[in-house]
Amino acid sequence: EVLTTAARAQLLEGGAVDIAQHLQPLELVKLAKVPGVTVDTIPATFMLWIELNAKMKPFDNIDVRRAMNFAFPQEQVISTVFQNLAEPLTACMPDIYAGYNKSYWEYGKQDLAQAKELLKGAGYPDGFETTLAYDASSGSQETSAILYQSALREIGVKLKLKKIPAATFYSNVSERKQPMIFYLDSPWCPDAGYSMNLYFHSKSFINYSNYENARVDELIDAASKTGDMDARLEMMDEVQKHVMREAPWVFVAKTNFSLAHRADLKGWTYYTSNNMRFQDFHR
């Protein structure tokens, strides 16, 4: 195993390996200009967000969670951190799945005035202090966190950044003890009901934001009991409406699947699991 992305990129550039996985955006941009190397990048099911722990103050308040979204510099993060190898995350499920509806998205433009007004209405006119945890192995998370920290300072929110070693990062996510923590994931099954159940049913293990809405649970349970696709999509549309309004996440980005490989290596096929099957490759 080659632990650092820089070392993996260097090995690919020198021709010692055929594929380098999970590279940082700037490394991918550089490799795309290297003779003998190809970088394939396509929209995928990857979603990057920040969990807002709904069982910890002040994130038990919907308006505070909405304010955190209005304050997030999404456009800046996508263009500078991700080098446009990502798109805005505009819903709580991948946009390539049936049932996706971006009409409930309202946080597209950073609006610090709106964020400040929401905090005032929630009882935090002078802001508050909180902590954002991120994966120490992810340069994109660290840089995004720094940009977010600067934006929040303008509305009185003092954000402390907490770097967590990669080996223990997932444990910190699943323990649900951080007020805010980055998370990158993708629902492998291309189904709206599967996506909603994973992240937003109150009894789901992967509901790391501790989000609870009785109506959302009711709709997800009902959808799991019928094969009527039209009915299921209608129910999942309502779930999206509730979730986007109540904002258990800070919606960061829908990151591309980007694969850097030697130019003569052919056959790569994309799967919604974002896993590669090496038997697909050939020369």
Image (cartoon, helix red, strand yellow):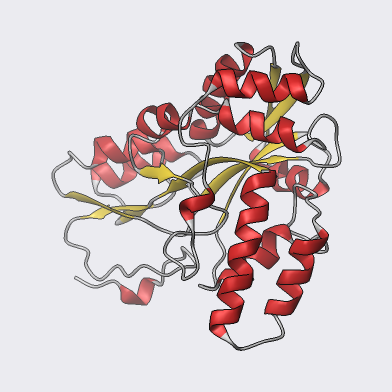
The image quadrant that residue 206 belongs to is bottom right
* Foreground of the two, 23 or 148: 148
Q: In which quarter of the image is the C terminus?
A: bottom left
Instruction: Name the residue at 79% across, 18% down.
Output: 124
Q: Can you name the residue that lies furthest to the left here?
A: 35
Instruction: Name the residue at 49% across, 26% down.
Output: 110
Q: Give the side of residue 142 with respect to residue 116, left or right.
A: left
Residue 78, horizontal then vertical, whole percent = 40, 34
Rendered view: 273 above or below 254? below
Q: Give the side of residue 227 with respect to residue 4, left or right.
A: right
The image quadrant that residue 43 belongs to is bottom left
Residue 221, horizontal then vertical, whole percent = 76, 75
Rendered view: 101 above or below 111? below
Q: Give the side of residue 262 with respect to residue 94, left or right.
A: left
Residue 8, horizontal then vertical, whole percent = 39, 44
* Foreground of the two, 87 or 221: 221
* Foreground of the two, 66 or 268: 66
Residue 112, horizontal then vertical, whole percent = 56, 19
Instruction: Name the residue at 38% across, 51% down.
Output: 256
Q: What count of labels does the image hold?
A: 0
